[in-house]
Image (spheres, grey):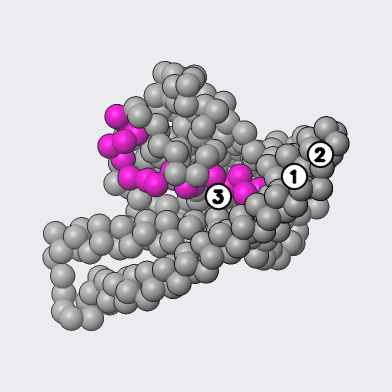
């Protein structure tokens, strides 16, 4: 798979009339980079597979205990089990993000495009994050209109993007705050917005928020869970679905992340 930076360098060398030796060196560099990327993808694939096995067991036994399989449980025990379950979900989301990111880098992330109604997907995404949001008494306000035109995209990946955006908004929103999800018709596309009423993102962080593993130095963010992968994975997934993504934020006024996807 061709690397965009290598392509830019090759175009520059063509414009400068570079000699055959220089071109050969660039070809060798590209092959080395492709091999390193492929090896990284294989490594991550093995690691994520090994991590998923124990997480599946932990979640399964936790659910059995919550359902009373080993006898009735009290409220404190249920709360402890809910914490375990929520953290298993967080770990599973991290593993999925790592896997998707590396697959996208080597062109192996498969999509299944379909006609997608957005409002039900927002409800499903909010439901998937219900326990994590309950930890800080946060809620999701689904303002996507029932009659909004459908989008042409992979429904599983759209829900994944929405979950990442809700999770990101929860990280910046105030305890007890509301995360608002809306959407509007923008001619040939639908723009989805996810807004939080939190403290906003510092201006110096804005150019970096979509970079993999980037986390702000702001202590308010550092104190919360996260690996800095959510927005980066969103950008990759949205690009694969022929869409665009962006972010607007002002300190003290909250943050809005928008995603544009083609209409069906």
Disc 1 from disc 3: Cα separation: 35 Å
98 over 177 or under it: above or below: below
Disc 2 from disc 1: Cα separation: 6 Å
Q: Main secondary structure of the magenta part?
A: helix
Residue at the spot 28% in from the left edge and 37% down from the top edge: 223
Q: Is residue 247 visible?
A: yes
Q: Residues within 10 Å of mark 2 (few under 14, many from 20)?
A: few
x, y percent for residue 1: 70, 58
Q: Which image quadrant is residue 224 in?
A: top left
Residue 231 falls within the magenta-colored stretch: yes
Disc 2 from disc 3: Cα separation: 36 Å
Q: Is residue 104 left or right of residue 63?
A: right
SS for dot 3: helix
Pointer 1: what residue? 22
x, y percent for residue 143: 58, 39
x, y percent for residue 197: 44, 28
Q: Are marks 2 and 1 in contact (CB under 8 Å)?
A: yes
Q: Residues within 10 Å of mark 1 (few under 14, many from 20)?
A: few
204 over 9 or under it: above or below: above
Residue at the spot 55% in from the left edge and 49% down from the top edge: 233
Nearer the observer, 253 or 184: 253
Residue at the spot 42% in from the left edge and 52% down from the top edge: 129
Nearer the observer, 64 or 145: 64
Residue 69 falls within the magenta-colored stretch: no
Residues drawn in magenta? 219-241
163 over 155 or under it: above or below: above
Pointer 2: what residue? 18
Q: In the rendered structure, which disc, 1 or 3, sits on the residue that comes first in sequence?
A: 1
Q: Residues within 10 Å of mark 3 (few under 14, many from 20)?
A: many
């Amino acid at each position: 798979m061709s690397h965009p930076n290598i392509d830019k360098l090759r175009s520059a060398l063509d414009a400068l009339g570079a000699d055959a030796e220089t071109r050969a060196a660039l070809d060798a560099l590209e092959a080395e980079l492709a091999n390193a990327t492929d090896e990284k993808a294989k490594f991550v694939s093995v690691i994520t597979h090994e991590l998923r096995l124990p997480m599946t067991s932990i979640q399964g036994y936790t659910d059995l205990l919550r359902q009373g399989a080993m006898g009735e449980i009290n409220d404190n025990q249920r709360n402890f089990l809910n914490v375990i379950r929520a953290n298993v979900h967080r770990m599973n989301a991290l593993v999925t993000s790592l896997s998707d990111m590396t697959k996208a880098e080597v062109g192996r992330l498969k999509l299944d495009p379909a006609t997608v109604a957005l409002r039900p997907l927002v409800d499903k995404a909010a439901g998937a994050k219900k326990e994590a949001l309950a930890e800080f008494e946060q809620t999701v306000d689904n303002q996507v209109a029932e009659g909004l035109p459908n989008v042409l995209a992979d429904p599983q990946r759209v829900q994944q993007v929405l979950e990442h955006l809700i999770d990101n908004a929860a990280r910046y929103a105030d305890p007890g705050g509301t995360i608002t999800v809306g959407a509007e018709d923008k001619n040939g596309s639908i723009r989805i917005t996810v807004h939080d009423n939190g403290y906003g993102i510092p201006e110096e962080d804005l150019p970096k928020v979509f970079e993999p593993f980037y986390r702000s130095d702001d202590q308010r963010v550092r104190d919360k869970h996260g690996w800095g992968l959510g927005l980066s994975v969103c950008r990759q997934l949205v690009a694969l679905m022929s869409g665009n993504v962006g972010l607007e934020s002002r300190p003290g006024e909250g943050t809005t992340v928008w995603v544009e996807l083609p209409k069906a």
